[in-house]
Amino acid sequence: MYVLCATFDPRLAVGKVKEMLALANEPERLAQRLGQPEEAENFKQGIEDASMETLVNGVQRVQEFLDVEREIEQVESGRWALGFMGKGFRDKRLKKLRSKRKEYGTLIDAPREFYQLNRVRLIGAIRDFALDCSEQGDAEWIELGNKPLPLPLVEMFEQGDVDLAKKIASALSKPFDKLDPEYLLKNLEGHRTLFFDFEKNLVTFYGPIRGANEEVFPPAEG
């Protein structure tokens, strides 16, 4: 997997996020500044609606799904605590667990619902704006290989980490102009901007290099 990596100015990035959060009472102007005037109404809703119940409930469902998955694995492998009850009892338990697993749908549902929230979409647009304003124009393609980026939201959804979901929900549920700019840059991901590394002053993201007239693709192999 290829992504772009560039140096960025942390102070400038934080400052630009602060500027956008300060426009809480001017959603139309905010949408214009972000280059998405057509999203003004959605951004207004994102400013006003701070509910993160979808996030906590979604991750809770993932945790429950994973618990069922683990029990199915234990029963199938013979490591189940009540394995001594016999094959008939085991088969009935498996049937019940598999039926219960179907009730949770897919693991895609939880992150999809979260990223569709207007506040989350707005924060993603602000992070992209901070990227465009602060990256230093030296972006290069890198291959992630076996060293994936630290993406806390991805890990939270994959592991069903309810405690982390509650912490993130608390941070994102504050009044819009009271959100922590540095927290938004360090602890979220989505849209084009993936990861701001404040220790190394590096930002990793998708998309064309700023100023390029055409879409930039990774170099062809060979």
Image (spheres, grey):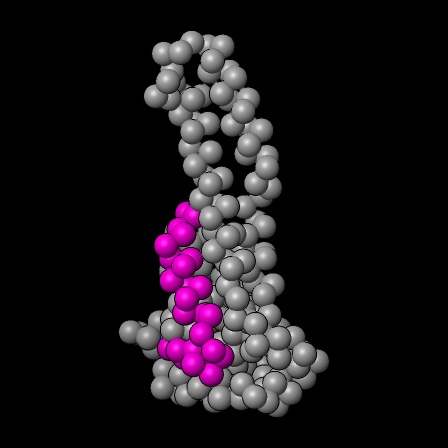
- Give percent across and percent down for residue 218: 54, 65
- Give percent across and percent down for residue 140: 45, 72
Q: Look at the image and say whether residue 123 sits in the magenta stretch.
A: no
Compared across the picture, whether 211 is left or right of 37 comes to left
Magenta part, dominant SS: helix
The residue sitting at the left extreme is 199
Q: Let me know if residue 30 appears in the view.
A: yes
Q: How many marks?
A: 0
Look at the picture and state if 61 lies above or below 81.
below
Instruction: Name the one closer to the observer, 187 or 6.
Output: 187
Start and end of the magenta stretch? 159-182
The residue depicted at 45 percent of the width and 70 percent of the height is: 172
Instruction: Name the one closer to the observer, 204 or 97.
Output: 97
Compared across the picture, whether 157 is left or right of 99 comes to left
The residue sitting at the right extreme is 38
Look at the picture and state if 42 lies above or below 24.
above
Instruction: Name the one closer to the observer, 137 or 117.
Output: 117
The residue depicted at 57 percent of the width and 72 percent of the height is: 49
Compared across the picture, whether 41 is left or right of 201 comes to right
Look at the picture and state if 49 lies above or below 151.
below
The residue depicted at 47 percent of the width and 51 percent of the height is: 59
Q: Let me know if residue 194 appears in the view.
A: no
- Give percent across and percent down for residue 45: 62, 75
Q: For residue 6, which quarter of the picture?
A: bottom left
Q: For residue 171, which quarter of the picture?
A: bottom left
- Give percent across and percent down for residue 165: 42, 57
The residue depicted at 41 percent of the width and 47 percent of the height is: 159
